Image (cartoon, grey):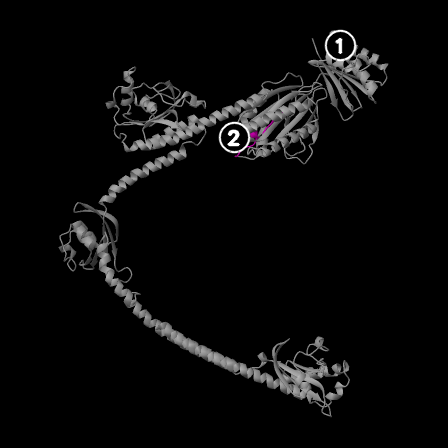
Amino acid sequence: MFLLQVLIVLLLVVAAVITLLVQARSDRFQGARDRSLASAESFAHAPGLPTVLKKGHPGASVVLQPLTEDARKRGGVDFIVVMDRNGIRYTHPIPSRIGKKFVGTIKPSLAGRTTIESVYGPLGHEVQATVPVKDAKGHVVALVSSGMRVSRVSSAVDRQLPVVVGAGGAALALTTAGTALVSRRLRRQTRGLGPSEMTRMYEHHDAVLHAVREGVLILDADGRVLLANDEAQKLLGLPADAEGQCLSGLGLDSRITELLTSGQAISDEVLPVNERLLALNIRSTDRQGGPPGSVATLRDSTDLLALAGKAEVTQSRLRLLYEASVAIGTTLDVRRTAEELTQVAVRWFADYATVDLAEPVLSGGEPPVGSYREAPELRRVAVAGIRDDHPLYRPGEVHTYLSLTPMATGFVSGQSVLVPDVRAAGDWYPDDPGRLELVMSHGCESLITVPLQARGVRMGIVNFWRSRERPFEEGELSLAEEMAARAAVCIDNARRFTREHAMAVTLQESLLPRGLPEQSALDLAHRYLPAQTGVGGDWFDVIPLPGARVALVVGDVVGHGLHAAATMGRLRTAVQNFSTLDLPPDELLGFLDELVNRIDEEATAANDEATVSGATCLYAIYDPASGRCTLARAGHLPPALVHPDGTVTYPDLPASPPLGIGGLPFESVELQLPEGSNLVLYTDGLVEDRNHDIDTGMHQLATALAHRDRTPQETCEAVLGALLPDRQRDDIALLVARTRLLPPDRIAEWEVPADPAAVAEARANLTRQLMEWGLEEEVFTTELILSELVTNAIVYASGPIGVRLLYDRTLICEVSDSSSTAPHLRFAAGEDEGGRGLFLVARMAGRWGTRYTSEGKIIWAELTLR
């Protein structure tokens, strides 16, 4: 009814508004028509207009434009346009439109009639009238058009419409308010329910109330029973005619009668009633304006308590398994995983727990797969208990369980064994009768033993012990098995990791230098520490070079594992091979960069997922004769330079991209190192850690190095002691080199003129120098080598020729010239006059070769001293 009344009033208001709008439109159109026609006729019949029109364009426009504008404003129209017979305007409110064609119908007006039309022109919806202008003879000489927008014409509707709308709104508001008051009153009486809903509620009331398995009891303020469903009568033992009677007269227990009639709010209070445990809830019925009284619900919780006990046990077991899954296997260490198993078991499950493993498991090996006739020799790996003074085997002890024990039975069969009472199980230690009594006297009188096996491999056994007060039950066997199974998987993973880690470390150590070469330029010490969780591709090397020089190399391959170690071996071998060419550091890194690119291309072509995405390298060459060190790096950290006074600096080496990135050349830097300086080369594993950035690590390294008079060995120990992290996640390579200088009296050099006659003088200088050094036995061989090298330089080279002798572990003879052409060893034919010089040098010298410099080349030969 409410909606119908509103709809009727709304329709009446809408009809009245539409009628007014239609009338307003008609009135506005008629008003615009009348005003436009009057303005056009008035101007068209103005005296003198035909005379002005004879002037034509533009003279007539100059005269008529102000006149039409004045008439337009006075007449209240939007425009008055005068045009010729062709519709070309003489005037217009917008001057830019003068001279353009009129928009509208002019043909009837040219015939002498007046034209009235409704158009949508530049100003909007307009009504325009077009009137002919006639001369004295009655001929149409021009046209006058006047127009007005319909929207400008006022109408009485503008005044009437607010009144109509307001009256309709007021009627609608009164109707709505009256209907709302009636509806509210009805809904309060029926609590918001309609007739059909009320009928349905009463039909289902009794069926629902008496079908629920929860007792419902409603009491009034005087304690009389207003309603008691079937379940309430059953739980409380009420008679069938209890409704309407006072509760205190129904013979109930005084405690429950007192609670039901107290009027207090009660939540889930458990009471014993007729050998049942009832959960009682009481709420007041007048909290929301209802009648005074209370409603009580009763629920039989006898079975629920039993289920709750079982649920609590189940929950505790699930909590134990969750704790085991979180706490066991946090590391890939076999011993630590076994310790975690015992700690979790003692915290939640047992009084004591022990883990015994076969010896191969501890080193990463795999025990034999198959059946066992007796338990093998096992090593106690982990023990945990509520007390430390227990008589159980200690960690590290090796023992063999006898065949009568449950431990041996469980290991051989692969099945768990439950022993609720150890005393009733017999003597397990015939060789040591007092041991069993000692164990039991310590409280270990209930046992579960579970074999540790994963992937069909039996690795050991775990024992859980309890006291007599709470012995193990049959239901706890599955819990022990589940916990042991999870630990076995973790131990197996740790075992396999240990094996793979040992293999990778063995491979890497086989690829690293096994010893440092003999040389006199540097006092060296090194350390290499593989990562605890997986070896990487860090490496270092010390390579003797001609001229008593030494090359120092340190590098790091991206990634970990066997692939990184193998790639490291390839790069180290490549560096050794490239160093035999005696290349400058920047050129050597360029060749190494190409090699890494080829390794990546090979891996990509083979669809190898473990591709090498780059490597870093630092290459340095130290010359003890001059004290100069030439260095270049490819994405590697700069070396640390410890000066003789103990100050530490990091030389500013050009930062080049890592190997394998390509695109940019490498640059080298030459440093002058004082004697006694320490050049420290390292990898990022030494200074980089998750707890701090790399700048902090380099600062800590500088602090550890800032000491005088330390040997390289002491420096290595100090650095590792200060920077080695607790959990080493990356390889660490450290190389410390203390510089030495070749004594000046062990160096001799002079220039030789480019004249064959100067060879004799060079031999004489050589002989004199060797005699001073006490190397008389080497004079003949060295003279022959020097003669051949100097003669070869005079014949084939140009510019100054230099000779330098170095007396080190070997005797080194060097001849330099300005030519970049290297000689080649060849076998001369019997009738050849030349071609035997380098052959003799190669036969008499221990080693010989060519080294290029910025000025030319150096041909050198080393003689082994006897």
Residue 687 percent across, percent down from the top left: 57, 30
- Quarter of the image with the N terminus is bottom left
Residue sitting nearer the eye, 832 or 514: 832
Question: Would you identify the image quadrant in which residue 85 lies?
Answer: bottom right
Indicate the amino acid at tag 2.
Arg
**Is residue 686 a member of the stretch shown in magenta?**
yes
Q: Which disc is residue 781 wearing?
A: 1
Q: Which residue is mark 2?
A: 729
Residue sitting nearer the eye, 412 or 699: 412
Q: Is residue 433 above or below residue 93?
A: above
Indicate the amino acid at tag 1.
Thr
Q: Is residue 373 above or below residue 178?
A: above
- Residue depicted at x 55% and y 24%: 508
Which residue range is magenta in the image? 679-690
Residue 857 percent across, percent down from the top left: 77, 23
How far apart are labels 1 and 2 at the CA level?
Answer: 56 Å
Whichever of callouts 1 and 2 sits on the residue coming sooner in the sequence is: 2
Q: Which disc is residue 139 wearing?
A: none
In the image, is 733 to the left or to the right of 792?
Answer: left
Residue sitting nearer the eye, 510 or 301: 510
- Residue depicted at x 46% and y 80%: 16
In this rendering, the label closer to the viewer, 1 or 2:
1
One can see residue 387 in this view: yes
Question: Would you identify the image quadrant in which residue 40 lies?
Answer: bottom right
In the image, is 1 to the left or to the right of 281?
Answer: right
Residue 127 percent across, percent down from the top left: 61, 81
One can see residue 263 in this view: no
Residue sitting nearer the eye, 115 or 584: 115
Q: Is residue 190 above or below residue 323?
A: below
Residue 34 percent across, percent down from the top left: 60, 86
**Is residue 735 a member of the stretch shown in magenta?**
no
